[in-house]
Image (spheres, grey):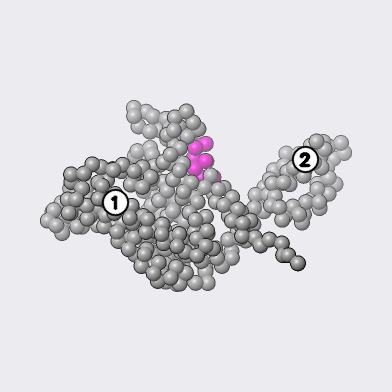
Amino acid sequence: MTLAQAYRWLLACYPRAYRRQYEDEMIGVLLDDATPGQRRPTTRDVLALLGGAFRAHVRQVGARLSVDAWREATQVLGLIAALVLFVRAARLPVLHLALLADGYPDGLGQGAVSGPAWLVSVVWLIVAMVAAFRWSRTAAAIAICAATLEVVRVVQDYAHYYTVFNLWPAVLAAMVPVALAIRAPRSARAVVAHWRLGLLATATLVSVAAPTIATVTSADRRTEAVRGTWIFTVGVGQVEAILLTAGYLLFALAVLSTPAVLRRRLLALLVPVGVTLVLTRVLLGTTGTFFERSTNDGVLGALTPAQWTTLVLAPALLFAVTVSILHHRERPGPQRA
């Protein structure tokens, strides 16, 4: 392999449009700077070219995400994500309140919900209500507080139980303030239309009320628990499982019923959450693989640095790949004469 071919192989890491415009010029400059008799790129040149390729891809993804369709998608994502996080945080506090109203003085007894759970749920509800209008920057500022609480909760769970089983809510929570901070031509309410707002409100009410309905009415007292690692996290009764599934399906319907341009971007924005969900609930703990978890007296051990690196980089890289594929798919073809 000649020196020019080696440089061209390194430049293949750059975006295609960038190579089309600058590749020959860059190879010429690199060859002019090479020492006589040099047969391979220096370590400095390799690092500089790979760093430049990374920066070029970041700029390209940023440029693609700056169009109005992506900006509006981020507003909708912020609204839906805030509602989903509210549902997750509020189910047990609402159940606790319902039991108190139904004559149970201690509510859930030993499982009574602490103050922070109420605080997190209320903050996410406020974020969703503010995000539904055009006050996205205000919602983003409030979401920072809620996202911080979610991250702290994950850190505490990891320290106590050595598990990252529920890492996906922290990832979704961290995305909310970033998404809402992006200025868009229209508010989330204007983008999703009124009937979808009603669908989201119904999904929220059904999901939040599911444990309360099943417990207060004793509907699940004689039914076996349904264990759903992906959906329910822990075993729930059959009636509660049906109500939760209905709520989740309504959330999915609200997303899938949006116009194609918005729907594709919403699904792309959810890729980091989906990848995290797969990594933490399917691959982590798989025996005989890179994601196998060590155990100590039956307690899961801490993740290795390589596993943590995978958890951080894999969602970001797959999101960038998804954006590139979507851009390539929507790019207009050559005009016919």
Tag 1: amino acid: Ile
Tags 1 and 2 in contact by the CB under 8 Å rule?
Answer: no
Which of the pair 299/269 is nearer the observer? Answer: 269
Residue that appears at 31% across and 53% down:
244
Q: Could you tell whether 121 is left or right of 331 in the image?
A: left
Which of the pair 247/89 is nearer the observer? Answer: 247
Q: Quadrant of residue 248?
A: bottom left
Q: Quadrant of residue 18?
A: bottom right
Q: Is residue 180 visible?
A: no
Segment tinted magenta in the rendering: 305-313
Q: Position of residue 100 (x, y in %)?
A: 16, 56
Q: Position of residue 182 (x, y in %)?
A: 52, 65
**Mark 1 lies on residue:** 242
Let me know if residue 13 is in the magenta part: no
Which residue ends up furthest to the right in the rendered image? 36
| Callout count | 2
Q: Position of residue 128 (x, y in %)?
A: 38, 64
Magenta segment, principal secondary structure?
helix
Circle 2 sits in a helix, a strand or a loop, which is it?
A: helix
Residue that appears at 20% across and 48% down:
220
Tag 2: amino acid: Ala
Give the foreground label among 1 and 2: 1
Q: Is residue 254 visible?
A: yes
Q: Is residue 72 above or below residue 15?
A: below
Q: Which mark is residue 6?
A: 2
Residue that appears at 47% across and 28% down:
288
Q: Position of residue 245 (x, y in %)?
A: 33, 52
Q: CA distance from mark 1 to mark 2?
A: 59 Å
Q: Could you tell whether 261 is left or right of 29 in the image?
A: left
